Image (spheres, rainbow, N blue to C red):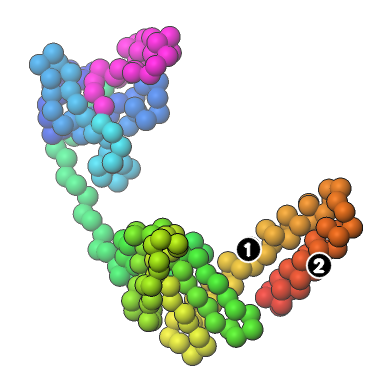
Amino acid sequence: MQDKNGKEIEAGIVVEISGAWSKADNGRFLVDHTYRDGGFWMKKLGAKGQLLKTAGRSWPLKCYASDWKLCYKIDAHNEANATVEVVSNTWEAPEAKPVSNEIRLTVNGIYKGEHYAPCYYSFDEKTGKVTIYARKYGRSEIPREMGAVRNDTDTMTDYFDTDSLDLHPGDAWYDRVKAVAVKSLIKDLKRRIAWLKKDLEKPATACHRQIGRGELCECERRLAKLTA
């Protein structure tokens, strides 16, 4: 098969498709292999020339949706407008960046190189103790360099958590973890305050309103203390 300029398309070359109905069908692709009927199978390339993990596709482009009327419309568009052009006779995978083992903390989890451990935090405002809980049982692990990690979860009753780690003032990672934990707590308090204010606008009994106002005042007090 030839591209729009008359160049032969073979396995291992890079082509660019334009004018296709779907945005995902446009862009640069690596031709994986060709067919006897003149078509070929291709894999999409990213902006930096890397192979993407998206599903491959064949040329000529073909729609396989359950709506046959839509497929007819898409196929007609692609047949009339989609073009393929050879942009390179060879393809080389871009050089992979070296993986860093640096530990990075976020509100939702901990990164160490390519490993990501989804976590949530608790902060004891009286004692100052910070606790990290790794969630998603079996797929999460707190880096052992951060301290004495516990893994005593009972899978029969608490199968959402795996590791946990307590940190106290003076521990190596305490200040960094505390900053993230406080940030997470502030976010939760703001969300709770907004919900309570909205809930108090609804019709309710005097007892319900008293309880709601009491919790609202406590949340606002804690928020003011944390953001002072």
What's the residue type where badge 2 is placed? Answer: Gly
Which mark, by number, is residue 100?
none
Neighbourhood count class around disc 1 (C-alpha, 10 Å): few under 14, some 14–19, many 20 upward: few
Identify the secondary structure beneath mark 1: helix
Name the residue beneath numbered marker 2: 214
For this view, does 227 lie left or right of residue 97?
right
Name the residue beneath numbered marker 1: 187
* Residue 29 visible: no
In the displayed structure, would residue 189 be above or below residue 9?
below
* Residue 114 visible: yes
For this view, does 160 lie left or right of residue 228?
left
Disc with the residue nearer the chain's start (1 vs 2): 1
Nearest to the eye among marks 1 and 2: give it. Answer: 2
Q: Residue furthest front?
A: 156
Whether the magenta-drawn stretch holds residue 66 is answered as yes
Neighbourhood count class around disc 2 (C-alpha, 10 Å): few under 14, some 14–19, many 20 upward: few
For this view, does 226 lie left or right of residue 45?
right
Point 73% across, 54% down: residue: 195
* Residue toward you, 163 or 174: 163
Point 19% across, 26% down: residue: 41
What's the residue type where badge 1 is placed? Answer: Lys
Identify the secondary structure beneath mark 2: helix
Which residues lie in the magenta part? 57-83
Cα separation, mark 1 vs mark 2, equals 20 Å
